[in-house]
Image (spheres, rainbow, N blue to C red):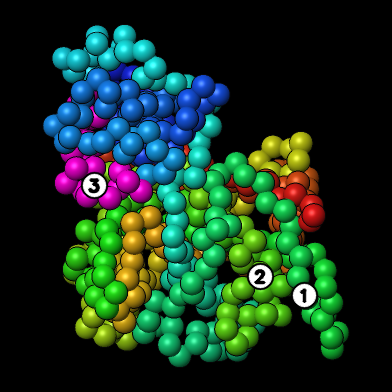
Amino acid sequence: MSNTNNPTWIHVPEDSDFPIQNIPFGIFKTAHLKPRIGTRIGDTVLDLTVLHKNDFFKAWSLDPSVFENSYLNAFISQGKSITNAIRNQIIQLFSEDAVERTLLQNLEGLTYAADEVEMLLPVQIGDYTDFYSSIEHATNVGKMFRDPNNALLPNWRHIPVGYHGRASSIVVSGTAIHRPKGQILPKDAEQPIFSQSRLMDFELEMGYIIGKTTALGSSVSVEKASEYVFGMCIFNDLTARDIQKWEYVPLGPFLGKNFGSVISPWIVTMEALETFKINGPKQEPEVLPYLQFEGAQNFDIQLEVYMQPQGAQPSRICQSNHKYLYWNIPQQLAHHTVNGCNINVGDLYASGTISGPDESSFGSLLELSWSGQKELKLQDGNTRKFIEDYDTVIMKAYAEANGIRIGFGSCNTQILPAL
């Protein structure tokens, strides 16, 4: 689908993730520029510090450090009344009939080709929580490792299950990750060994960024949750399945998860995604009152995963959708804070693996290979059960409706040998 309703004087290629209706936010730098906030239209990155210095944002009296900054946190902290107004101002400035068009076209340092800038980690992540919100994924895992007739644990349909992860090892797309090492229990062995992981996997997820701070002891209701979410990104929750399998009982993920997770560099605002809301799966049994919600709270966001062996072309191995999530974002945030846990601007929450109802929509190699029992055939003749050294995993996400495509770019990482 092309972006047919695309009234901007900046060239936007057909099927671009970044029409003028998107206006995501990220952090970029060049060889001659320190990190700063940018946005993207088509293949053009716009330097917001230049717009600020030339008084295009003067209505909000913001300090220059909000824009010339290594992270989005200070910008997000201004609140949605300001960040949304700035986003709308950018849309107006770069619309086809903008009165400022000639001035902006001649403004030095305003625009850069997307392939000429380096994208950085967009937010300073203080805390990170990973949920387990896809019923298809949870069911598949339960079938493989527990009782196929009772795949879901008794609490799964009652609470959005999650765990607190490691924020320090979350990196931006394009960062390579070394294969981790740890304890594993080989098949039929009685004692563990120390080894590099032999079963490296990806998990296809979406993340969302918190935009408001709460006090310790307070909570965020389902009804108010949208006020606290700034935007979304793609999230690859890399997993060492063999390390995870040995360690996860009784306290859950640890070394099998915290060696590296990858996010896409552009944060797409919730306002850009509002028209793509859709109803999620029916929740049975009825959830407790603090988790009950009204209206459509899932998003119709197409998700894709590609596997690219070194020197080969990428092969698409998964097509899923954010709409499959059983537990939606407001429910996740309401549950996370119902006990009084405080949240901060820049906190990152991930959805958990998003798997769909059929095999082609399974969001991990664990499911696609059914724990290594099947091989995936790639278009170049290679086969995979799990990630091999020098493989690159590429994730993409985009929403389409009424001639408009709002996308997230891509989330890429190459797996390198263990150090």
Q: Which of 222 and 28 lies nearest the eye of the viewer? A: 28
The residue drawn where x is 16% and y is 46% is 81
Residue, disc 1: 183
Q: Nearer the viewer, mark 3 or mark 1?
A: 3
The magenta segment: 73-93
Main SS of residues in magenta: helix
Q: Where on the picture, by quarter, is residue 348?
A: bottom left
Q: Is residue 13 left or right of residue 310?
A: left
| Dot 2 amino acid type | Leu
Q: Say above or below: 318 vs 117.
A: below
| Dot 3 amino acid type | Gln
Disc number at residue 78?
3
- Does the segment drawn in magenta span residue 172? no
Which badge, 2 or 1, is on the more N-terminal residue?
Answer: 1
Q: Where on the picture, by quarter, is residue 412?
A: top right
Between the C-alphas of marks 2 and 1, the distance is: 9 Å
Q: Position of residue 321 (x, y in %)?
A: 43, 56
Which badge, 3 or 1, is on the more N-terminal residue?
Answer: 3
Q: Say above or below: 52 vs 172.
A: above
Q: Is residue 350 left or right of residue 309?
A: left
